[in-house]
Amino acid sequence: MALFRRSEYGIGRGEIAESRVEFPFFVAFMFASALGLLIFHWYFQNISFTLAIGISLLIFGLTVLRVELGVFFLVIAMLLSPEIDAGKVGLGNRALNVRYNDGLIIVVFVGVLVKIAFEGRQHFWLPNPVNPGIALYYGVCLLSTMFAYRASIPLFDKQEALFTLLKMAEFYMIFVLVGNAIRSIRQVRQQLVVFFITAAIVALYGLYTRFISGMDRVSAPFEQGGTEPNTLGGYLVMVMCLAAALYTQAPNRQAKILCGLMAFVPFFTFLFTLSRASYIAFIAGLVALGIIARKPTIIVAVAAVLIASPFIMPDDVKDRVNYTFQRGDGKDVSIAGYETGLQVDKSTHERIYVWQKVRYNLYVWPWFGGGVSWDRVLDSMYARVLIETGIVGFVAFVFLQLRLLKTMREAYLWNSNWLARGIAMGMFATTIALITHSMGTISFLIVRMMEPYWFLVALAVLARHLAIEEYVRAKRAEQATALPKAA
């Protein structure tokens, strides 16, 4: 009954304690859900769907009771949610992978909306610098896609454009629902515990796939259509950057040990992703963290590891890095029509060649591009943004990233709480790392990276908001103290 005993929140304008209506609502909702499930199972006779719907209804009910519980389930499902092949879509008959988490996001989001309605809150989301960036970039994506649809551009894939836009909307839904659900540093701490436990499970599973299952490169749980080590590498970069930032701000030895372990444990899994984009991103993230936290020892340590890497890194890692530059068997690299004399592997060459596609597309549709999912570029996020949404979309995308960095910077400058400062620093470093990572892949469109990323961004935005509230309270207290003296 502990769920129903807290009276922190009120219904409407606060006249009625929430605990007085929670229990009757929960009992009525569970009864109606059980009855509906029985009818559904009797009619369709599908135990898998019945189970999935039953779990979703239970999570919805718990979310309305305690919104942080819904976020707990969401954090776990981001990387540990089952994934199924839903067939082929679009002109290219590309695989459509559906995850249980896709539906869970909507379930928790609606639960949060119901909670907001119960409480009678006037605002939907906390004011912050990120909101205009999201609205501008997503708006340009919609506008560009509508232009492409109206112009009937040849080979424009309407189905894939729709699914891509829905995927992007999911990311921003996570940002909104977490920002509405989490309200205190205590709740932030609880969410981070669940996040790091999930990350440890993913890291250990990756080591299992490498050393027990014998895969050449590590894998995340429930992946369909082959492993995605580049995606896993980007996710682990986020985990390690955040843990390292918390380590720099930890106030005592116990906290430093825990944060240090969470930065250290995923590192071995990270190495065996053999993702060169992730390696460079991690270096960029640590350098950014060293600068922002004013810890030059981090930069010195990174430099020392790089210098010693030919002697201390596993052979698989050294071979993967050395594979980039080849003599005789690689692809020739030319810049602006001039041969450089360098030869690189096919994967690296494709990341360079994609900018030729950008140049050709900008001649045809420079301002708004060819619409979302045009040409389906996978080798660079920036190249894809230019091809799909043109110069206007590129400016909006950069504006969003600058807004993210501005928000993280303000959050760590304005906070006195070590946890809030650590999250803000970690997300600043993570954003720099993902900007670097996205030079070689479409990082800001990958589900298993963006769902946890926007979850963590929401926590950093909340840290900024709490700092503002603390400052306002302090100023009001100061003014209240000054008034009697003036009188």
Image (cartoon, rainbow, N blue to C red):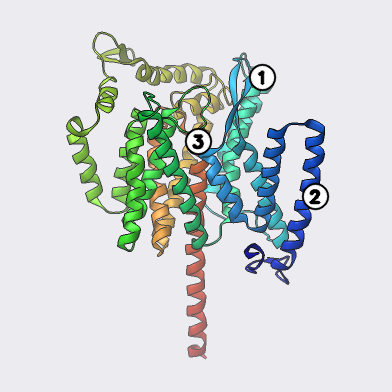
Give the image location of residue 40, x and y in percent: 79, 37
Q: Quadrant of the N terminus?
A: bottom right
Which residue in the protein does label 3 denote?
A: 448
For mark 3, give the secondary structure: helix
Q: Quadrant of residue 41?
A: top right
Q: Which mark is residue 32?
A: 2
- Residue at horizontal 28%, vertical 9%? 329
- Residue at horizontal 30%, vertical 11%? 330
Give the image location of residue 148, x and y in percent: 63, 22
Which residue in the protein does label 1 denote?
A: 151
Other residues around mark 3 within 10 Å, as few (<14) / some (14–19) / many (≥20): some
Mark 1 or 2, which is nearer the eye? 2
For mark 2, give the secondary structure: helix
Q: Is residue 294 left or right of residue 452?
A: left
Q: Is residue 339 above or below residue 472?
A: above
Give the image location of residue 180, x and y in percent: 60, 55
For mark 1, give the secondary structure: helix
Alpha-carbon distance for marks 1 and 3?
33 Å
Q: Amino acid at mark 3?
A: Arg
Q: Quadrant of residue 173?
A: top right
Which of the two labelled residues, at mark 1 and mark 3, occupies the earlier sequence position? 1
Circles 1 and 2, Cβ within 8 Å, touching? The answer is no
- Residue at horizontal 51%, vertical 44%? 454
Q: Is residue 110 left or right of residue 459?
A: right
